[in-house]
Amino acid sequence: MNDILLMLPGPTTVHPRVLNAMSQAVVNHRGAKYGEILTETTELMSKVFQTPNNSYLLTGSGTAAMEAGIANTVAPGEKMLNVVGGKFGERFMKIAQTHGIDAKELAVEWGTAVTPQAIKEALDEDEDIKAVSVIHNETSTGVAAPIEEIGKVMKNYDALYIVDTVSSLAGDEVNVEKFGIDVCLTGSQKCIAAPPGMAAITFSDDAWAAAEKVETNTFYLDMKAAKKSGDKVPPQTPYTPSVSLTYAMNEALKMVIEEGIDNRVARHHKAAKASVAAVKALGLELFADEAVSSATVTAVKMPEGITDDQFRGTTRDKYGVELAGGQDHLKGNIFRIGHMGNISYKELTQTFAAIGMTLKGLGVIDDAGAGVSSIAESYL
Ligand SMILES: *Cc1c(COP(=O)(O)O)cnc(C)c1O
């Protein structure tokens, strides 16, 4: 096993049960055995998405599902509104532009969340908007968007509601049916805690109706092809899937269901609350607006006078804890603690011990144990 503790917003530590499941014999992906495992896995996936609709596995990372979600449902030239408050919102903009979609940006300050009201106003202003994309958990800034409330607004408009739950599904509350989400997508390596390399997506009836009208402009990610293969008996995927990762997803999703989705979400919220308290106990400042801070990743301002290399280099190389840095203009200005997947007080204690020792060693703080002490109090 890797003796570096991964406290990243993906990939996250993979449980031995999942690693073992992956080592099963690779079978014919056109045969009955794979059909069984695929059926079971996509059914588990729909349970976790909380939708009565079918789910589809895509061999590729989360971005493949982002691209599949847009390219199949919005035609070139059609207008789409994208909430952009970080790196992943920007990615939806870029994917839309790549497919010739008329991509509009609803910009929100990085570190804050979009409001349902802002979306309502944008839709009232322009009735040609065919779809709205929202990143549920903006991993680059540690902010969670109010997707349930936005869903209530979306119900009054024809526009499709496309939600990226790559870093929130199985970690924060996502209920595709209840929230009225038309296209919901996720990845394997975040809260689901499987290895990287698979993505999953589900479409509502409205999304499928939109897909029927869009002329196919992506080959590998063609959802009509995925549906056609998925409807075969036994079900298949259009091209060779990662058989091993299907086993991994199957086992990881079983672990989600065994824990219980609500329990798992509560565990993530508890870890987030404990992390925020420990960050403050160390005298550090949150990057995100605390009222909307994420259940799965905590973004922290880098203390003055130290570099990203000094800080994260030391937590990793000296203390065995790998944290994430900032992206783009936040590089060097923030660090991020991923607390998604199989995370509890043990991992957080180790993490905050590493952060405390590093900061004391660099002369930033006096009390190396303040974070650990706070974690202990939070979990008592
Ligand atoms: C990780 C992530 C993705 C997908 O990234 P991949 O590297 O393609 O797996 C998409 N959206 C969000 C919010 C993410 O955190």
Image (cartoon, rainbow, N blue to C red):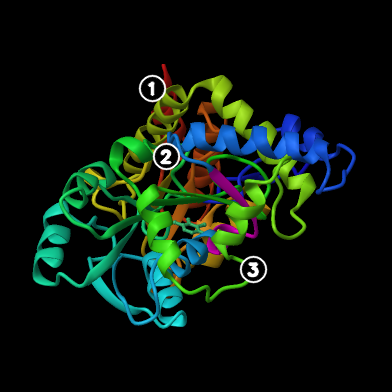
For marks 1 and 2 on the same chain, the one whose residue lies earlier in the sequence: 2
Q: Name which residue lies at 42% across and 21% down.
A: 379
> Few, some or many C-alpha atoms within 10 Å of disc 2 (few <14, some 14-19, many ≥20)?
some
* Horizontal arrangement in the rendering, residue 246 relative to residue 299 (left or right): right
- Name the residue furthest right: 25
Camera sees residue 149: yes
- What is the three-letter code of the residue carrying label 1? Glu
Q: Is residue 286 above or below residue 175?
A: below
For marks 3 and 2 on the same chain, the one whose residue lies earlier in the sequence: 3
Of the pair 65 and 351, the residue shown nearer to us: 65
Residue 377: mark? 1
What residue did someone put label 2 on? 367
For the residues bearing labels 3 and 2, Cβ distance under 8 angstroms: no
For the residues bearing labels 3 and 1, Cβ distance under 8 angstroms: no
Q: Quadrant of the N terminus?
A: top right
Q: Label 2's element?
A: loop
What residue did someone put label 3 on? 220
Magenta-drawn segment:
55-64
- Name the residue furthest top: 380
Q: Is residue 333 above or below residue 373?
A: below
- What is the three-letter code of the residue carrying label 3? Tyr
> Few, some or many C-alpha atoms within 10 Å of disc 1 (few <14, some 14-19, many ≥20)?
few
Of the pair 13 and 21, the residue shown nearer to us: 21
User: Of circles 3 and 1, which is in front?
Assistant: 3
User: Residue 56 magenta-drawn?
Assistant: yes
For the residues bearing labels 1 and 2, Cβ distance under 8 angstroms: no
Q: Label 1's element?
A: helix
Q: Name which residue lies at 51% across and 27% down.
A: 345
- What is the three-letter code of the residue carrying label 2? Asp
Q: Label 3's element?
A: loop
Could you give the CA–CA distance between mark 3 and mark 2, rounded to whole angstroms? 53 Å
